[in-house]
Image (spheres, grey):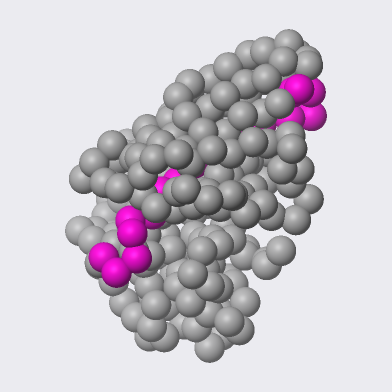
Amino acid sequence: ILNVEQSPQSLHVQEGDSTNFTCSFPSSNFYALHWYRWETAKSPEALFVMTLNGDEKKKGRISATLNTKEGYSYLYIKGSQPEDSATYLCAFQSGANNLFFGTGTRLTVIP
Amino acid sequence: GAVVSQHPSWVICKSGTSVKIECRSLDFQATTMFWYRQFPKQSLMLMATSNEGSKATYEQGVEKDKFLINHASLTLSTLTVTSAHPEDSSFYICSARDPPGSRLSDTQYFGPGTRLTVL
């Protein structure tokens, strides 16, 4: 079992604030790093798949960076909105199949 | 596109009974599907990898005779929890991956999950 850690575990931000969270993963045997957004009672939604060190990806107000050498990825949300409230999961992929998930960061955006 | 459904969304059963959970890829063919479970305050943990037309590959510590997986078509995989006990109560969630070679081949698309409660 690989150790994937996410921090913080939860956070509350005011609408309009920008925020970021961290995903730490093993720096060896890296294949890909996945970010998902998971709203209650819905399916986890794939946000990004990142494969290259130094990668930066963006989707609307959400962006992510990747550092495979030191084993971390940051997810940024600019100008948070109440609809951004969800649990954000990262998953480390070391081969063709298995994803090793963190426990997630639960974000609550207060109107 | 890339929608995965799961049924049922929740189930309550008596100890000793069997429960079947279905996972379907609605708009794509999935040669590989995955079954995860999540206990409270823990992360999603892979239970098994299901390949269409062949036997599933189980992760260490997951009993293959207790968690029966069938992947008989490119759009359907089922997980049957046999002789369920209270310790099997958990959140079970499946995912499906597009066939290798496509642009989406590394993305797993998840169903909404099934909450199993065994009394």
- In-image side of B24 versus A8 (left or right): left
Instruction: Look at the image and tell me in which quarter the N terminus of chain A lies.
Output: bottom right
Q: Is A102 in front, or is B108?
A: B108
Residue A94 screen position, x and y as percent? 55, 73
Residue A52 screen position, x and y as percent? 38, 83
Residue at image coords 53%, 79%: A30
Residue at image coords 61%, 29%: B80
Asked whether A73 falls inside the magenta stretch, the response is no
Q: Is B32 in front, or is A98?
A: B32
Instruction: Look at the image and tell me in which quarter the C terminus of chain A lies.
Output: top left
Residue at image coords 72%, 15%: B17
* Residue furthest to the bottom: A69
Q: Is residue A9 visible?
A: no
- In-image side of A104 versus A81 (left or right): right
Residue at image coords 55%, 62%: A98
Image: A8 above or below B9:
below
Residue interval drawn in magenta: B83-102
Q: Is A86 in front, or is B54?
A: B54
Residue B12 screen position, x and y as percent? 63, 14
Image: B77 above or below A101:
above
Residue A45 screen position, x and y as percent? 35, 47
